[in-house]
């Protein structure tokens, strides 16, 4: 079976995208998705997404991790899918779409930056050396010094496979403060089971717990191995955040066809 696909990336977080807006995309098995995402035997990507039609919304986002399993929200994926919708002719100034964690909004600025509204956060599990919170996907956030020297794959895998998180899995973020309102984030992603160049929901989680203002508007600049993102949000208190926007680039890499079995 030959399928047409598109490859997009947002700060190095890369995705295979299939256009299912007319409900013509093939139904793929877990094994087929995993092979498409494989960096030796397929296209190579951190995940695969479908752009689908959804009544009452501009589109629906359906997301699969690189292991071929349908997964929770992907922030960079949502930004890439919004840019893909624009490239496919769905031109709007403001988008509303449905993802696994509920409704999202998105905007494309004149300079091509995609702004994605994330879900509100109403709980932060605080520990002496780390925090756990859900920004559409569950995240473990740990502050460290000199994170460029950390073996993120090794350290992240230990935490992800620990007794507390082994069953459901968790994404692990190592964060370093670089300025009052700037951080550097490296992420180990479940489903990919490796470090990725960037993780939108992880960047969002790290930014929330790095708020520089006690309450009210915050904007945190974030460096990742794949590039620069920013997160704007309103901090109500240490447990509650709303009006959260993940902002950054999303670009078409190439389009093509591939034969899959």
Image (cartoon, grey):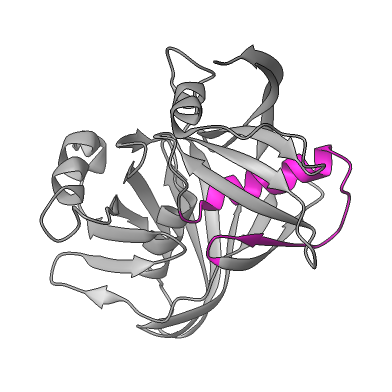
Residue at coordinates 54% horizontally, 15% vertically from top-left?
261
> Residue at position x 54%, y 19% from top?
43
Q: Is residue 97 visible?
A: yes
Asked if the stretch drawn in magenta spans residue 239, the answer is no
Query: Could you say where residue 140 lies in the image, as x and y percent from the top left?
Result: 27, 59
Up-down: is 44 above or below 90?
Answer: above
The image position of residue 232, as x and y in percent, is: 56, 67
Residue 29, compared with residue 103, is above or below; it is above
Question: Which quadrant is home to the N terminus?
Answer: top right
Number of numbered labels in the structure image = 0
60 and 8: which is toward the camera? 60
Q: Position of residue 102 (x, y in %)?
A: 58, 68
The answer to which image quadrant residue 134 occupies is bottom left
- Nearer to me, 138 or 207: 138
Determine whether, in the image, residue 213 is placed left or right of residue 19.
left
Q: Which residue is painted at 64% across and 34% down in the image? A: 17
Residue 121 sits in quarter = bottom left
Above or below residue 229? Residue 117 is below
Numbered range of the magenta stretch: 72-101
Q: In this rendering, does residue 112 appear at all?
A: no
Q: Position of residue 97 (x, y in %)?
A: 71, 61
Using the image, determine if residue 49 lies above or below residue 180.
Answer: above
Q: Is residue 76 magenta?
A: yes
Picture residue at 57% right of the left edge, 32% below the top: 28
């Amino acid at each position: 079976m030959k399928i047409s696909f598109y490859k997009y990336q947002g700060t190095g977080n890369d995705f295979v995208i299939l256009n299912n807006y007319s409900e013509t995309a093939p139904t793929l098995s877990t094994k087929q998705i995993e092979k498409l995402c494989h960096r030796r035997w397929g296209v190579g990507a951190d995940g695969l997404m479908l752009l689908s039609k959804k009544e009452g919304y501009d589109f629906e986002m359906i997301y699969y991790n690189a292991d071929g399993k349908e997964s929770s929200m992907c922030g960079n994926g949502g930004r890439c899918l919004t840019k893909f919708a624009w490239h496919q002719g769905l031109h709007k100034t403001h988008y509303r779409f449905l993802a696994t964690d509920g409704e999202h909004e998105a905007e494309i600025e004149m300079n091509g930056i995609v702004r994605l509204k994330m879900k509100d956060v109403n709980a932060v599990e605080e520990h002496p050396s780390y925090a756990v919170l859900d920004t559409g996907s569950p995240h473990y956030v740990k502050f460290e010094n000199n994170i460029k020297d950390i073996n993120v794959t090794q350290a992240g895998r230990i935490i992800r496979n620990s007794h507390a998180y082994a069953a459901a899995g968790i994404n692990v973020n190592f964060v370093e403060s670089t300025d009052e309102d700037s951080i550097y984030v490296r992420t180990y992603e479940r489903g990919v089971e490796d470090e990725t160049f960037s993780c939108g929901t992880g960047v969002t989680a790290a930014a929330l717990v790095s708020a520089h203002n006690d309450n009210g508007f915050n904007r945190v600049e974030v460096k990742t191995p794949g590039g620069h993102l920013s997160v704007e949000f309103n901090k109500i208190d240490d447990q509650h955040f709303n009006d959260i926007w993940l902002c950054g680039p999303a670009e078409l890499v190439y389009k093509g066809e591939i034969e899959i079995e």
